[in-house]
Image (tube, rainbow, N blue to C red):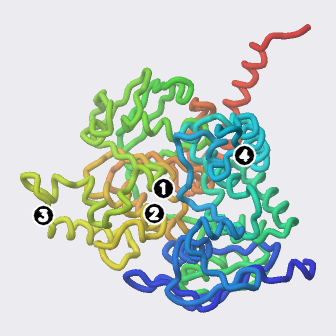
Amino acid sequence: MSASAQAAVLSVSNIGKTYAQPVLGDIDLTLMRGEVLALTGENGAGKSTLSKIIGGLVTPTTGDMLFQGRPYAPASRTQAEKLGVRMVMQELNLLPTLSVAENLFLDNLPSRAGFIHRKKLREAAIQAMAQVGLEAIDPDTLVGELGIGHQQMVEIARNLIGDCHVLILDEPTAMLTAREVEMLFEQITRLQDRGVSIIYISHRLEELARVAQRIAVLRDGKLVCVDAMANYNSEQLVTLMVGRELGEHIDLGERKIGSVALSVKGLTRADKVRDVSFDVRAGEIFGISGLIGAGRTELLRLIYGADTADSGSIQVGSPLQTVRVSSPVDAVSHGIALITEDRKGEGLLLSQSISANIALGNMEAISAAGVVNGNAEMALARRQVEAMRIRSSSPTQLVSELSGGNQQKVVIGRWLERDCQVMLFDEPTRGIDVGAKFDIYALLGELTRQGRALVVVSSDLRELMLICDRIGVLSAGRLIDTFDRNSWTQDELLAAAFAGYQKRDALLSEAAPRND
């Protein structure tokens, strides 16, 4: 690295933050010009708090910061961005009712005679989107019509516009395809060449080894390691993060696979989900794999009644009975639960307490004549906080103050009190650290031992191979194949994920007019 690249662009000294209790303390850290600094640690370790302090979203309780050699104390995210410190958070900062182009340039829309200059806006958006591999998306598309993975790439593109000196990426690849990840890594290399410094927050340790020069590990709000990335392998980093060793094997315990508890036949919705059929047995974990846009989330939403199917049927129970699921209320009444991938937008009331959020799905058990029993609500919350190992000061703490992983545990905990025999998990470990993932896996094992049938959607193929009994692969809305644990390979699963798109492209090519 050149001498100019060795210059410190940002330094923090004695940074600490206290809410109901200290969540961060005595942090001393330096970010060099043009480097990628990996920041990792368990959920609740303080990663997001530290990054939000640097990004101007949170004011530290103690400590000082220097940016480009000058005192740095941004009063807001906007102020930090004007100085060139940008942050891409897990919670996307996009407006779903505006177009991609409008979201990209919301603070600086090109205008002419008091009106938005649509041609200039479109041209600028196409250029910005090309940097992150979104050439195929029309910039006039409403953001709300995009999947979460594509929304994440739009958010990254937005933050690369203009003068950027420090870029904070918080779990940037959690919902990206392999191709999108490669595009992101290429962009990171180009940013480094321009002298941009990057703080890369991730639990995917193999990614950190690829992109980062140094690594900082947080545990319980304290820095336990700041060193060259090359000095550590994944196992050593996991031990630093969690304070104990974890293996790459999960024992789900002795289970009994019973009769079919969920049967889906010919489920179809437009071109998103096409004639999908599968069965899941009691005590079984059935994984659903596929690329972003394959229809995985749409399939779960159809089963749960959040969207309306054009055709198809759903059977549940023992013996199986065909049920009408036209709404989530219907689904829950038939013993079907959904743990959504969008915990912020669909899974939680962020302004409410842990106890209130857990109580949402269990009102009948804690209320009488329309009046909530406070003691029963608190007992319910304490039971799940302990069972789920939710890190918090108390059940009365606001959910918005929890880390992403602990927020996800609150969502899951809400359903554990209900007698739902079919549980649909959409990206259950998204944004969750290595240690907490194994806690979730153990929980899934316990649920199957209780005889529940689980359907798990995940973008992490290795995760599905670790925990599932069978894996069905969706591609272009169709269920291409289903693999048993003893017969699958990673190559076969990946090939199936692309097969539907290859078939669709071939059909489109045959249907296209020829100019012979």
Mark 1: amino acid: Pro
CB-based contact (under 8 Å), mark 2 and mark 1: yes
C-alpha separation, residue under disc 4 versus residue under disc 1: 24 Å
Q: Earlier in the sequence, mark 4 or mark 1?
A: 1
Of pointers 3 and 4, the one earlier in the residue sequence: 3
Quarter containing the C terminus: top right
Residue named by callout 3: 373
Q: Helix or strand or loop: what does disc 4 sit on?
A: helix
**Residue at image location 71% in from the left, 52% down from the top:** 157
Q: Nearer the viewer, residue 447 or 252?
A: 447
Q: Which mark is residue 440?
A: 2
Quarter holding residue 391: bottom left
Residue behind mark 1: 428
Measured Cα–Cα span from mark 1 to mark 3: 30 Å
What's under tag 2, amino acid-wise?
Ile
Q: Nearer the viewer, mark 4 or mark 2?
A: 2
**Amino acid type shown at disc 3:** Asn
Dot 4 crowding, Cα within 10 Å, few <14, some 14–19, many 20+ = few
The local secondary structure at tag 2 comes to helix
State the residue in front, 119 or 306: 119
Tell me: 295 left or right of 419.
right
Residues packed near mark 1 inside 10 Å, few (<14), some (14 to 19) or many (20 plus) = many
